[in-house]
Amino acid sequence: MNLKYLFRPSTMAVIGVSTSQDNHPANVIYNKNHLRYPVKTFPVNPKGGIFSRETLYQTVEDIQEKIDMAVIAVRSEFVPGVVEQCIQKGVGGAVIISGGFAESGNLRLQQRVVDIAKEASFPFVGPNCLGIYAPDYVDTFFLPGERIIHPDKGNVGFVSQSGGVLVDQMVKFAGQGIGISLAVSIGNKAFIRETDMLDWLDQDLATKVIAFYVEGFEKGEGRQFIKKAEQCSKPVIILKAGKSKKGIEAVSSHTAALAGDYRVFSEVMKQYCVAEADNEYELTSFCEALSCYPKGINGNIGIITLSGGHGVIAADACERHGVSIPGIEPATIGIIKEKLSPEIRNIVSLENPLDLTGSSTDCDIVTSARHLSRDNNIDCIMALLIPYSPGISTDIGAKLSLVARNEGKPMIAYVPNEDKYRIIIEGFELNNIPVASSVEGAVLMAKALMRCRPC
Amino acid sequence: MLDKTVKKIIEKSKSLGWILEPDAKALMKSRGFDIPDSILTSSFKEADQFLTHSKGPVVAKAVSKKILHKTEHQAVVTGIFSSDHLKNEMERLQKLVGCENILVEEMVQGIEIIIGAKNDFQFGPVIVFGIGGTSVEIYNDTAVRMAPLSPDDVLSMVNSLKAKEIISGYRGKTGVNMEALTHLLVNFSQFVMEHENDIESIDLNPVMCTKDQCVIVDARIMLQPS
């Protein structure tokens, strides 16, 4: 089964384009791809006619060119026939947008489509989904371009059972400057499922981190998924919905009561180093952190702060999330103290978190980060950079990034997410250092690195 | 040969839906796990002889197809030292619903551990390990991992418990023999993998662990509905 034609199509048929409803999903999809994407797009409607001064093809078979991918947005009862036509034409795969299948009790209709597709090895996404957003290639989301926020092209591959969660998460990614390599809403996942997407994204060169929103797996499918995740060369992140304990009260053994469905899910993810995010904010932090650092840490953080308060807030968050803040070696404290500006030498606190105070300068921060990185007790640096003090320059992000690269230990930064500080944020992010927009977010990033495989 | 024992026991228990304790123990023994010395009898005379020859106190349990959870039915008596005590309790146990036999066992001391298995819908066989006893669901200090387990999994399960010091030993008290515990958990997880089509869930609770050994004191095996 080759998914190349689905995710990297050169030609696409949109089946179900309406001559009367401007907001019909097929029309939205046709318009945005026809006008804004390189994929060559053909509108199809059994009635034929003219649409936006273009010929409407009556069937996909009437199109002269080879078609890589079809978007199917017709009423559910017509889907099996349309899929057969696509197979006949030699189309490489489909996105079935239409609803009215398993989600509304029509299991048999869905199974019919699956049987037809399986027999012909014809892969499809859906039904009942938004489909595929592959930046620079194709966008089958039936949401007008002006209504959604697209993250930049980047290295996070995101697969979601829910289209709504996917679009919402894209907004969050965009807000944090996280880019997408591929986003797929798999809906009823009747053919292409999480395990197929894991295979595709593992070998996709543009993807560095693979994230999933999952409601549940089929019988035995969780084991299959986790075995693939174990083999996968990239960090895998998962957000699970449907965690309630319903249904376990009546079980007859202690073990079954202790190991409820979600408990098993969560513990197995941990066992196989899949980073489980508790909510969408964690998912965002995890994606950013793991796209910069695919290897894990033990979670011994050295914190540099310019305000005592931020240090305390970070320490509290670290405790809450199981991240440790170990003591620093006396030799490290000695060398940092010696190299600090004389003006601050006697007012700083050189315990972990290191409080360099609002009077510190770039040089003090860089020196502290360098020597803290060399401390054997520390395996990750967290820089809480409130850029309000006059001694901090706009170059601090780029300067600290260089320290992280030279010293070889992961660094995580907190900078307030304001346009004014953009140059500092980019100084970090363009050099592959993750930046959180809150202290808690920075700690969540450290937590993400702990949940990944240790180096 | 050993596998035949397992198959035979599973086959004969299918109609009941679960395996009675003496059979579950025999099954565990056939896989090389330690169980207490015992006698299955309805005769007080035989039971009394067992008490006389045992090194310490004994435990008496009612064996009944109608009693799945023995504690709730007061179907377990521990710490029996004397013939009189044994006689009285045997008479009481024999009156319990469906009681067919009495299982008299040597009483084993140690740290109470639960080792369990569940055939999970999404992940197949998973293993539960933690602090055992009758309050296990209240404390719920357990770890869950997908079977089969590696020795590293066992170590991480122990380390993830709140009460990990109880396993490793604290304040002068000896802990659990990690080699014996690892052997038991790893092999138990393999057993569960081999029989995933037959087994719905297993409670080995308690398993009594000391610095020398891990002994399965109670075993309940629930079978898959056929």
Image (cartoon, coloured by chain):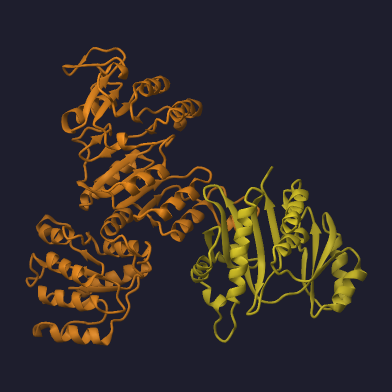
Chain colours: A orange, B yellow
Q: Locate residue A332, reporting x and y percent.
A: 23, 83
* View extreme (right): residue: B45
Residue B100: name its quadrant.
bottom right
Q: Quadrant of the N terminus of chain A?
A: top left
Left or right placement of residue A80 versus residue A330 in this view: right
Left or right placement of residue B197 versus residue A174 in this view: right
Left or right placement of residue B149 versus residue B199 in this view: left
Up-down relation of residue B204 to residue A69 (above or below): below
At x 89%, y 73%, the residue is B48
Q: Quadrant of the C terminus of chain A?
A: bottom left
Q: Locate residue A388, reporting x and y percent.
A: 11, 67
Q: Locate residue B141, reporting x and y percent.
A: 54, 66
Given residues B1 and A96, the one toward you in this image is B1
Residue A450: name its quadrant.
bottom left
The answer, for residue B136, to whether it is visible in the render is no
Given residues A70 and B140, the one toward you in this image is A70
Given residues B58 and A315, the one toward you in this image is B58
Q: How many marks?
A: 0
At x 86%, y 67%, the residue is B90
Up-down relation of residue A248 to residue A113 (above or below): below
Given residues B80 and A42, the one toward you in this image is A42
The answer, for residue B42, to whether it is visible in the render is yes
Q: Locate residue B192, reporting x and y percent.
A: 62, 56
